[in-house]
Image: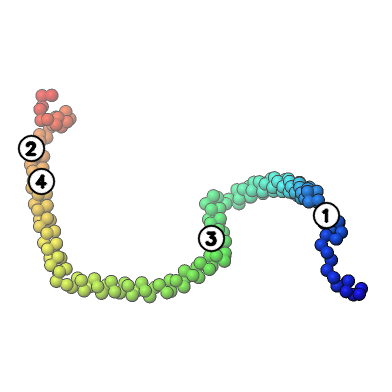
Amino acid sequence: MDEQQSTKMPKPFENPTDFESPPLVNSTSQQFEFKEEDKLKQEDDYRQELGKIQDEIVTLRQVLSAKLKRENELKTLLGIGFVEDLKQDWNETVHDIKSTNVYQKTAGTLHAATEKISPVVQTVNTTLKSRLGSLRNSNYFKTFETTLGSTVNAVKSKMSTSKSTNFRENNSSVSNLPTSATHSEHLNFNGDATN
């Protein structure tokens, strides 16, 4: 019979202590206090680390300033000028850029793309040349070329005759000027010599 009792399910709420639950407010406030203390301690650690880093930065700036000053003194003693310095910096920058993985991958990609595109460009170029050649040999283009050529020749001939006429008129007016004209006579634009 003892075996039967041991397999029985316990009745709910047999003990009064089973029914009571621990107070939630107290445990939550304790957890909150622990979290708040941890947070304040961590912030304090961060502030201390920040202070150390800022001190190190100041020290490094002072050392860098001294090194730069010494570098300039040595360059002056060696006669290295501004232009040479720029060339050296440029060459170093280009070398640094070319040695990066990104540049090498990009250059490889561009080289592969150029190898693939180059036959296409040559095909398009050949096609355009053949089409322009066939267009140039067409009757329409020949008619247009002839018309344009005759128009250009007509304009040229009219311009040359007007230039030669103007040249003759200008030469005759120059030859009619008195050779002993004074400065005031040349400045008289109205042709009135009395003023």
Q: Which of 132 and 5 is in front in this view?
A: 5
Q: Nearer the viewer, mark 4 or mark 3?
A: 3
Residue at 8 percent of width and 46 percent of height:
168
**Label 2 vs 1, first from the N-terminus:** 1
Mark number displayed over residue 176: 2
Q: Is residue 107 left or right of residue 2?
A: left
Residue hosting label 4: 166
In the picture, residue 169 is in which quadrant? Answer: top left
Residue hosting label 3: 94
Whole-number angstrom distance, CA of label 2 to CA of label 3: 72 Å
**Label 4 vs 3, first from the N-terminus:** 3
Q: What amino acid type should be assigned to the residue bearing mark 1?
A: Glu
Q: Which of 124 and 156 is in front in this view?
A: 124
Q: Measured from the top left, where is residue 193 in percent x and y?
A: 10, 27
**Label 1 vs 3, first from the N-terminus:** 1
Whole-number angstrom distance, CA of label 2 to CA of label 1: 134 Å
Q: What amino acid type should be assigned to the residue bearing mark 3?
A: Val
Q: Measured from the top left, where is residue 21 in percent x and y?
A: 81, 54
Q: In this view, does 24 lie to the left or right of 94?
A: right
Whole-number angstrom distance, CA of label 4 to CA of label 3: 62 Å
